Image: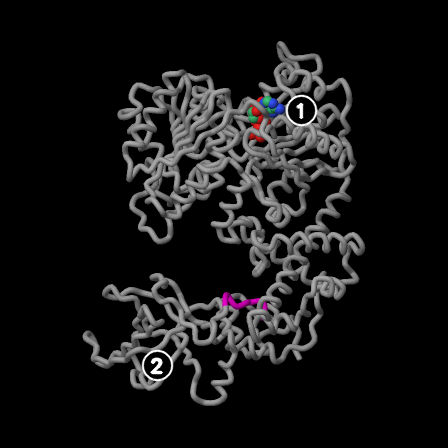
């Protein structure tokens, strides 16, 4: 009797084991039993052949309709052409060798599974020389084999078909002995979950739908509990680390800053601020995620936290995803601080600190000064891009790391910066403007505590959003440019956003210099032909300048511009000496020009829902209402148009984030840095298994609190170390 650790060589023999290893990396019995069916085919049910797509590797259930042999044209010999049907559509199968042999088996009326790659020949979809397996065969043994109502269909490859896998799984299931169950019996009882062996049998050989379902739920629990137990341990370990307490003190920079603020904080800002202030005062590191829409006032909260740390003798680092944003933060933090940030300079306040900017491309002298200020402690606040992670950057006493726009960073980068503080760990505050649904936060950021700023500061103007169908109604596009001119005449400004930079860049081959420009662009809908490459800044800007926006002052902005040019373009737009900024998504986050009232987004269907929402947050930041125009050539009724209509219909960022996530594949939701996690969550869906994840988190936290090393739960602990090994491997692969 075999356990889950048994090598497949032992149970299946070297040849089959080697095939499974090559095709899927499966090496143990446990690996194979966790290669779950993708779906189940109902006996007698045929595959919708009309839905097959060219190039796909498919497994289809169909009935043989007619069989024809003819001599081949180019070569000697016979060709067998078999037409199969699902009752409506047809698919051609062609066989070249051993024609009589195939012909004897594939007689009209027979049902079979066929596997192969779909191609098109003379306008007809076909499978050339498919593998196949007859169903409902006449001998008794075969009939019994297919008596089951549900036939599992496994993820398969060209070399390993679903029935090959099924056969291996049957062998392994038949030799399966007693299994150590990672789910503790009381938990199984409480949630009515099957035992592990029973569930593995149930998912691979279900007698009916109900059995398949309950097996799936049980196996999802394994995935959820193991992950949540890892995260619970991680939270526990992090909470036990030493950190320097940075308690608030009266009469320092933080108080002076509050007194200087030209507005009063919202209730949400006060509440989150109090939480952060209390956590900074503890001698264990804070690990907090602060989420809130663009403009919800996160930066103000971060600055107050940084000042509390400086008052307590420490320094703070603020990490931005791009140079443009680092510069923007530098300017806005300096503005917010005013004389409080001018220590040792003319006009500096008596109690004051200094703000240093460190980026990859700044002039050597400026860089040297910033490095010195960071190392000596003269700069209380050091702002930069990931260049801050470079080893040469030293801090006198780093007490707080603020990471802006988390969705562009990996966990490992955060860890690198944390490591900059000698001995004690710095406190960490991660800010994100992308609303993250609760279960995603629990899965991806499960080792962080989460605060949310739900309300926008008062006085913010509403943003109206409209879809401009440029192909059907060119007149609407003309009207969009007229609107831009009208705003400019009133002394206001506009953004024009394009999906691509253009110029000598290959449409997609060259790496953009700025990570902000490589944000996930969505391709055209799968079922549509790509007509042309997405519009580019370097093409659109001159076309507007010589056409509908002639006479207005245009500037361009994108990640490939030299730093000086970026800076000067941003400055020109910020001080109003440019009317229109034509740019890529580098303006997506953090850029703040209250006088900008219109945003025209070209090829808007190329952007994700959340990204469009982020982009439009750039307008309507002043007293005038904002207008966002989503220009698209996507036809009415297409998925892309629906996405844009969703964005136009609501300003609720959480709702849009959910729509966005629903349209992505699960692995993409978890992100590239979650390689191990992606692999280990085979059944669990962070979008659809909300209740299960919440319950698993509670249970896991309880188990870890009662037994931190989980020594009383060896099977669970073993699964956890397997998960950690996978994450580690994923991390190594990336570096
Ligand atoms: P976020 O970082 O969340 O995008 P910011 O902190 O940059 O938001 O705030 C956006 C704008 O709103 C800034 O100009 C800021 O000064 C202003 N602001 C922040 N908090 C308030 C408030 N309580 N009342 C009025 N304006 C505020
Ligand atoms: Mg911001």
Mark 1: few, some, or many residues within 10 Å (few <14, many ≥20)? many
In the rendered image, residue 34 lying in the magenta stretch gets the answer yes
Q: Quadrant of the N terminus?
A: bottom right
Residue nearer the viewer, 123 or 333: 123
Residue nearer the viewer, 169 or 353: 169
- Find disc 1 in the rendering and name its residue: 380
As drawn, the label of residue 555 is none
Residue nearer the viewer, 477 or 500: 477
Residue 562: quadrant of the picture: top left
Secondary-structure class at tag 1: strand
On screen, residue 106 versus residue 729, left or right, reads left
- Camera-near label (2 vs 1) is 2
Magenta region, mostly helix, strand or loop?
loop
Q: Residue furthest bottom?
A: 139
Ligand 1's quadrant is top right
Residue 642: quadrant of the picture: top left
- Is 357 located above or below residue 69 in the figure? above
In the rendered image, residue 615 lying in the magenta stretch gets the answer no
- Find disc 2 in the rendering and name its residue: 109
Residue 165: x %, y % from top left: 50, 73
Q: Which residues are magenta?
A: 33-39
Quote the CA–CA distance across marks 2 and 1: 80 Å
- Is 153 located above or below residue 244 in the figure? below
- Tell me, yes or no, if residue 561 can be seen here: no
Residue 647: quadrant of the picture: top left
């Amino acid at each position: 009797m075999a356990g889950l650790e048994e090598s497949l060589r032992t149970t299946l023999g070297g040849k089959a084991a080697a095939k499974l290893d090559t095709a899927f990396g499966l090496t143990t019995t446990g690996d194979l039993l966790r290669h779950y069916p993708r779906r189940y085919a109902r006996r007698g049910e045929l595959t919708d052949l009309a839905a097959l797509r060219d190039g796909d590797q498919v497994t289809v259930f169909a009935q043989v309709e007619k069989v024809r042999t003819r001599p081949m044209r180019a070569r000697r010999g016979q060709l067998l052409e078999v037409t199969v049907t699902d009752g409506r559509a047809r698919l051609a199968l062609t066989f070249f060798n051993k024609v009589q042999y195939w012909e004897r088996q594939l007689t009209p009326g027979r049902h079979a599974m066929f596997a192969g790659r779909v191609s098109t020949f003379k306008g007809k979809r076909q499978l050339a020389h498919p593998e196949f397996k007859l169903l409902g065969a006449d001998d008794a043994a075969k009939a019994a084999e297919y008596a089951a109502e549900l036939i599992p269909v496994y993820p398969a490859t060209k070399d390993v078909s679903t029935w090959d896998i099924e056969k291996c799984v049957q062998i392994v299931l038949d030799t399966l002995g007693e299994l150590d169950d990672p789910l503790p019996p009381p938990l199984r009882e409480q949630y009515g979950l099957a035992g592990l062996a029973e569930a593995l049998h149930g998912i691979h050989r279900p007698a009916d739908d109900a059995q398949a379902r309950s097996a799936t739920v049980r196996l999802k629990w394994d995935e959820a509990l193991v992950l949540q137990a890892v995260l619970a341990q991680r939270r526990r370990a992090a909470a036990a680390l030493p950190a320097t307490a940075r308690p608030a003190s009266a009469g320092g920079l933080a108080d002076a800053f509050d007194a200087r603020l030209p507005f009063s904080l919202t209730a949400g800002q006060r509440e989150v601020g109090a939480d952060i202030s209390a956590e900074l005062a503890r001698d264990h590191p804070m690990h907090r995620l602060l989420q809130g829409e663009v403009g919800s006032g996160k930066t103000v909260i971060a600055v107050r936290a940084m000042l509390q740390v400086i008052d307590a003798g420490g320094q703070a680092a603020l990490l931005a995803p791009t140079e443009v944003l680092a510069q923007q933060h530098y300017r806005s933090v300096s503005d917010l601080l005013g004389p409080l940030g001018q220590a040792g300079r003319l006009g500096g306040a008596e109690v004051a600190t200094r703000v240093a900017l460190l980026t990859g491309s700044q002039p050597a002298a400026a860089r040297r000064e910033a490095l010195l200020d960071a190392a000596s402690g003269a700069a209380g606040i050091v702002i930069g891009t990931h260049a801050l992670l470079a080893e040469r950057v030293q801090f006198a006493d780093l007490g707080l790391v603020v990471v802006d726009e988390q969705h562009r960073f990996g966990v490992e980068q955060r860890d690198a910066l944390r490591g900059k503080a000698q001995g004690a760990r710095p406190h960490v505050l991660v800010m994100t403007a992308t609303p993250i649904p609760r279960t995603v936060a629990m899965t991806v950021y499960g080792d962080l505590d989460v605060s949310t700023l739900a309300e926008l500061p008062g006085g913010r103007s509403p943003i109206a959003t409209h879809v401009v169908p440029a192909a059907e109604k060119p007149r609407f596009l003309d009207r969009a440019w007229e609107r831009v001119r009208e705003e400019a005449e009133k002394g206001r400004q506009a953004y024009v956003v394009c999906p691509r930079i253009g110029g000598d860049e290959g449409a997609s081959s060259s790496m953009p210099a700025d990570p902000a420009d490589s944000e996930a662009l969505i391709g055209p809908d799968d079922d549509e032909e790509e007509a042309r490459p997405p519009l580019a800044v370097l093409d659109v800007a001159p076309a507007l300048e010589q056409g509908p926006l002639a006479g207005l002052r245009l500037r361009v902005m994108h990640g490939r511009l030299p730093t000086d040019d970026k800076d000067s373009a941003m400055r020109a737009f910020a001080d109003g000496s440019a009317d229109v900024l034509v740019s890529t998504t580098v303006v997506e986050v953090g850029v703040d020009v209250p006088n900008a009232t219109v945003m025209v987004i070209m090829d808007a269907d190329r952007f994700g829902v959340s990204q469009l929402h982020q982009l439009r947050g750039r307008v309507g930041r002043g007293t005038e209402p904002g207008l966002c125009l989503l220009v698209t050539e996507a036809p009415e009724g297409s998925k892309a148009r629906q996405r844009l209509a969703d964005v136009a219909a609501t300003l609720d960022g959480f709702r849009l984030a959910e729509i966005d996530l629903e349209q992505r594949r699960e692995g993409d939701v978890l992100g590239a840095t979650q390689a191990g996690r992606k692999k280990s969550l085979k059944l669990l869906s962070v979008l659809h298994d909300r209740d299960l994840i919440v319950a698993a988190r509670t249970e896991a936290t309880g188990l870890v609190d009662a037994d931190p090393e989980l020594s009383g739960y060896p099977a669970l602990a073993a699964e956890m170390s397997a998960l950690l090994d996978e994450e580690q491997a994923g991390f190594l692969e990336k570096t």
